[in-house]
Image: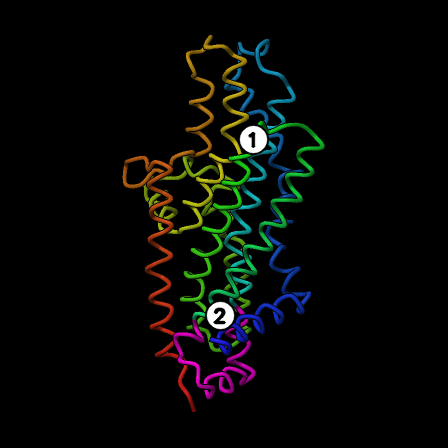
Amino acid sequence: MRGFFGLVRRNLLMYFKDISAVVFSLLTSIIVFVLYLLFLKGNYVSSIESYAKGLDTFIKDGDIDMLVTGILLVGILGSALITVPYSTIMGIVRDKETGVSDDILVTPLKRRLIAAAYFISAAICSFIMVSFIATVSFILVGIRGNLHMAPGAILATYGIILLGSVSSTSLFMLVVTGFKSSAACNAFFGILSAAAGFVIGAFIPISGFSTTVQTICCLFPASHVTVLLRHSLLNGIVEKINTDIGGVDGGAFASAIKETFTFELPFMGKNLTPWNSAAIACACVVVFSVLCMFVYSKTYKRK
């Protein structure tokens, strides 16, 4: 096992020593933030205020602002849980292109252990990077206001990030093993970065898509993980606003927010509960991980 852990350590060091890889893995999160400031914040605020007509005396302006900030944070973390895992697992393609994988394959390590080392190191890198984004975001949000998150909800957020890192890494490792060059891998990353925000509903809520597109979005584990993030990050502020309203609207405002911003993924005409989404994400980890070991063993051969 010394060789296995040595390979994991080597992959971790290779990722964090490549500053450009670290920066590009965060690029989508930065883009989402800029788009929010320039275009999306006003639209979200107007949309939420339309649901709050007649309830202005009950809802504080600061709470609306924090709710929109929470929606932004979900979009940033959700997008990061697609782009960061992909960028961390790209090292497997670089090793193949430079011939390093040939050197690794002649070691006594079995190919499934080599594949597992790539997978585990990429998942660890992803978890560290996205957790860093979450921690910085929590600090900045705490300076501006209060999302009314209980300590348990904060811990749950990091647990969800771990689930998202592992599930996305397992999926993208399956994808990148089919690439033979970094150029092709980077080209796909560009497409992925552009689509990530739409797949998880960061730019446009999934509830605004057609039934077919909603079903397609449900096929990606990151969409399910993002729904879980909405619950951990937004439930506190939504319930706080609902409490301030005091039942005057019969809970209509909270229900409208949860429906509009997709607190439950619509799949083939039915809404999936958070537990359903968590189970699907966990199932993806198991299925994709097994497939990764098999595909790597067949694709990467000793010379």
Q: Which residue is mark 2?
A: 118
Task: Please name the amino acid that badge 2 sits on.
Answer: Tyr
Q: How is the image coloured?
A: rainbow
Secondary structure of the residue carrying numbered label 2: helix
User: Residue sitting at 55 percent across and 67 percent down?
Assistant: 186
Q: Which residue is mark 1?
A: 149
Mark yes or no: residue 34 visible. no
| Residue 135 in the image, given as x and y percentages of width and height | 63, 44
Q: What's the magenta region? A: 90-115
Mark sitting on residue 59: none
Direction from residue 176 to residue 36 in the image, left or right:
right
Within 10 angstroms of label 1, few (less than 14), some, or many (20 or more) residues? some
Farthest bottom residue? 303
**Magenta-highlighted stretch: main secondary structure?**
helix
Task: Please name the amino acid that badge 1 sits on.
Answer: Met
> Does the magenta run of residues contain 35?
no
Vertical relation: 83 (above or below) 56? below
Direction from residue 11 to residue 219 in the image, left or right:
left
